């Protein structure tokens, strides 16, 4: 009985994976050039969004230290 349920789950997982891949391919086709270019640099943009607040915090601390 567990073999059937494992096989059924495996088939469901395969179907879901194929459906997700089809949706991804469809979305890539419908995106314009600008969106695809931004998608290429997604990790770089995340890194910059992380670094800038840290740099601002450091600058604020330096300013506070110099004022006191």
Image (tube, helix red, strand yellow):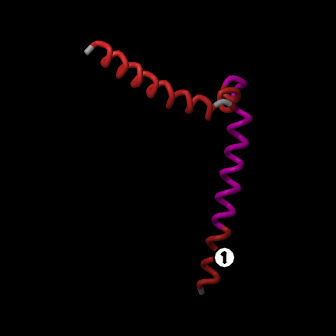
Q: Is residue 46 magenta?
A: no
Residue 9 sits above or below residue 42 on the image = below
- Which residue does the image show at 64% across and 64% down from the upper left? 13
Position in image of residue 9 (x %, y %) = 62, 71
* Chief SS of the magenta region: helix
Foreground residue among 63 and 28: 63
- Which residue does the image show at 55% across and 27% down from the upper left? 48
Position in image of residue 46 (x %, y %) = 56, 32
Q: Residues within 10 Å of mark 1 (few under 14, many from 20)?
A: few
Q: Which secondary structure lies at badge 1?
A: helix
Residue that mark 1 sits on: 7
- Which residue does the image show at 71% across and 48% down from the upper left? 22
Q: Quick one: quadrant of the N terminus?
A: bottom right
Q: Is residue 33 magenta?
A: yes
Foreground residue among 67 and 41: 67
Q: Residue furthest top?
A: 67
Q: Is residue 23 left or right of residue 45?
A: right
Position in image of residue 18 (x %, y %) = 71, 56
Q: Is residue 53 left or right of residue 24?
A: left
Boundaries of the magenta span: 12-34
Position in image of residue 17 (x %, y %) = 67, 57
Q: Residue furthest bottom?
A: 1
Q: Quick one: quadrant of the C terminus?
A: top left
- Which residue does the image show at 46% across and 24% down from the upper left? 55
Q: Is residue 33 left or right of residue 62?
A: right
């Amino acid at each position: 009985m567990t073999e059937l349920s494992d096989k059924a789950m495996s088939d469901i997982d395969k179907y879901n994976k194929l459906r997700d891949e089809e949706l991804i391919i469809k979305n890539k086709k419908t995106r314009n050039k600008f969106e695809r270019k931004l998608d290429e640099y997604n990790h770089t943009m995340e890194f910059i969004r992380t670094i800038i607040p840290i740099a601002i915090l450091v600058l604020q601390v330096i300013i506070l230290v110099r004022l006191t």
